[in-house]
Amino acid sequence: MDLGCGTGTNAITLAQHGWQVTGVDFAWRAIQLARQKARAAGVAVDFRLGDVTRLGWLAGPFDLIFDLGCFHGLPAGGRSAYAAHVRRLLAPDGTFLLYVMFRAEAQTNQVGIIESDLGCFAPALRLIHRADGTDTARGCPAAWLTYQHATPSRFGEADAR
């Protein structure tokens, strides 16, 4: 699933590589363009018009949930709802791949998140990889984050004695 899929570039690329893809975006025109691009590319992608903070209508599980710049553009109040949907929709062995831009805590009028905003994915999702860098378009700190469902311990309390 591609959250905030826009005009479908990444969803189409995934479909071209054998993935069955659902793309969600709130912009009607972007979804229309995505559907046209998918037809032109000869791939099937299920593009849906929707709000990523209100995905109760969407059934999973998804082996891969991909977000290239949607989460960090959400208002603070929508991030926990978004995270709840990701946790619910991600398959037990699935991967959530997230690209985010960061902002200074005092810059509340800027696009981006602060480090503590990532806490909404814990403890259900476990960060397994992080690659920090700089967003070249905006010149701000950014990161690729890879999450998976947190795995309960193989050993029960009785075994820990």
Image (cartoon, rainbow, N blue to C red):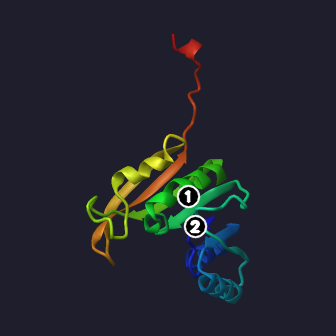
The reply to whether discs 1 and 2 touch (Cβ–Cβ < 8 Å) is yes
- 133 w.r.t. 146: above or below: below
Going from N to C along the chain, the mark reached first, 1 or 2, is 2
> Percent from the top left, x then y, of residue 15?
66, 73
Q: How far apart are the two marked residues, 1 and 2, measured between alpha carbons? A: 10 Å
Closer to the camera, 13 or 113? 113
* Residue 82: image tag: 1
x 34%, y 57%: residue: 114
Mark 1 closeness class: few <14, some 14–19, many ≥20 residues within 10 Å: many
Closer to the camera, 119 or 161? 119
For numbered disc 2, what is the local secondary structure?
strand
Mark 2 closeness class: few <14, some 14–19, many ≥20 residues within 10 Å: many
The answer to whether 59 appears left or right of 116 in the picture is: right
Q: Amino acid at mark 2?
A: Leu
- 89 w.r.t. 102: above or below: above
- Residue farthest to the top, as pictured: 161
- The residue singled out by tag 2 in the image is 3
Q: Amino acid at mark 1?
A: Tyr
x 37%, y 61%: residue: 113
The answer to whether 86 appears left or right of 18 in the picture is: left
For numbered disc 1, what is the local secondary structure?
helix
Closer to the camera, 118 or 14? 118
The answer to whether 129 appears left or right of 65 in the picture is: left
x 55%, y 58%: residue: 82
Closer to the camera, 61 or 57? 57
Closer mark to the observer between disc 1 and disc 2 = 1
